[in-house]
Image (tube, grey):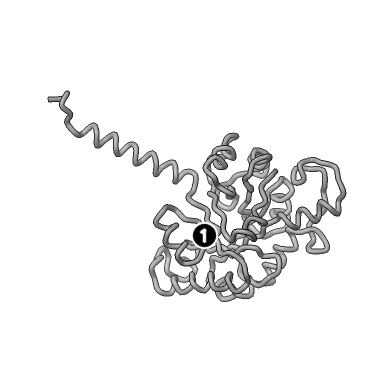
Amino acid sequence: MTSDLKSRLARDGTAAGTMVFEFFVPGLPAIVVATGADFVLYDMEHSGVSFETLKQQVAGCRGLDLAPLVRVPSGDYPMIARALDIGAHGIMVPMVETPEQARRIVAAAHYPPDGQRGAAFGIAHDDYRPGDPLGKVRDARERTLVIALVETARGLENVEAIAAVDGVDVVWLGHFDLTGSMGLAGQFDHPDYMAAVRRIVAAADAAGKPAGFLAADADWLERYWALGFRLIAYGLDHVLLQSALTAGIERIRTLAATPTPSDS
């Protein structure tokens, strides 16, 4: 694989991609990279997709300038280590609430001396190549991106400490769950929610790390970019299809309902 999203973020301070819930098809990585995206974020938390299917998707990213990332369903070691062993360049962990939890996630994602990830080389994550294990450990450390998803009131209370954990690379806002946890389900203009968003961005900035966000559409993108989010996943695969198809179908219906000279 040729993409190095972690270095790109350090150099440019921003990166763009998309999130996948449904279309785990062979051509998807090539379709996504053709848009100019830097990464594709595969969801395991809500999609029900298996590691076996994801391994094929990650293989499809090999040789492309596209970083495959995986949102694992939990911060348990087997979830994190398996996602990285199949070749993911990084992991997103939901419901991160304490710095202690964040440190455990970092440890699961990195080999010793930086963590506790179990060693297996000459497999998918290193493109099945032989080589010096020390070099492979170094390469993995430099490539692996750890994204902490802050989406609960407790996580918000500890966001500064979470962002400061060495090895947490991105602080990501989970906007829907955060509003629910705050008793404000779906109230994205509520002053308390907006204060929480600004606190998350400030915590990321103070730690010298980007804040991440899933923008459902162009309006959400503009709004959250202005708030300071710089690692952006644009849209969900099925929502993007629905949106484009809805616009096309509505246009057909409009044309069908509009008399033309040939109809008169």
At a point 67% along the width and 56% down the height, the residue shown is 7
Residue appearing at x 46%, y 62% in the figure: 224
Which picture quadrant has residue 212? bottom right
Front-most of 193 and 206? 206
Q: Amino acid at mark 1?
A: Phe
Q: Position of residue 244 (x, y in %)?
A: 39, 41
Nearest the eye: 100 or 202: 202
Q: Nearer the viewer, residue 93 or 110?
A: 110
Q: Position of residue 58 (x, y in %)?
A: 66, 42
Instruction: Name the quadrant of the C terminus.
Output: top left
Left or right: where 228 falls relative to 53: left
Q: Residue at x 42, y 62 (%)?
A: 223
Against 232, is 34 above or below?
Answer: above
Neighbour tally class for label 1: few under 14, some 14-19, many 20 plus, Cα within 10 Å:
many
Report whether 105 appears left or right of 97: right
Mark 1 falls on what kind of element?
strand
Q: Is residue 48 left or right of residue 138?
A: left
Name the quadrant containing residue 141.
bottom right
* Residue denoted by label 1: 213
Q: How many marks?
A: 1
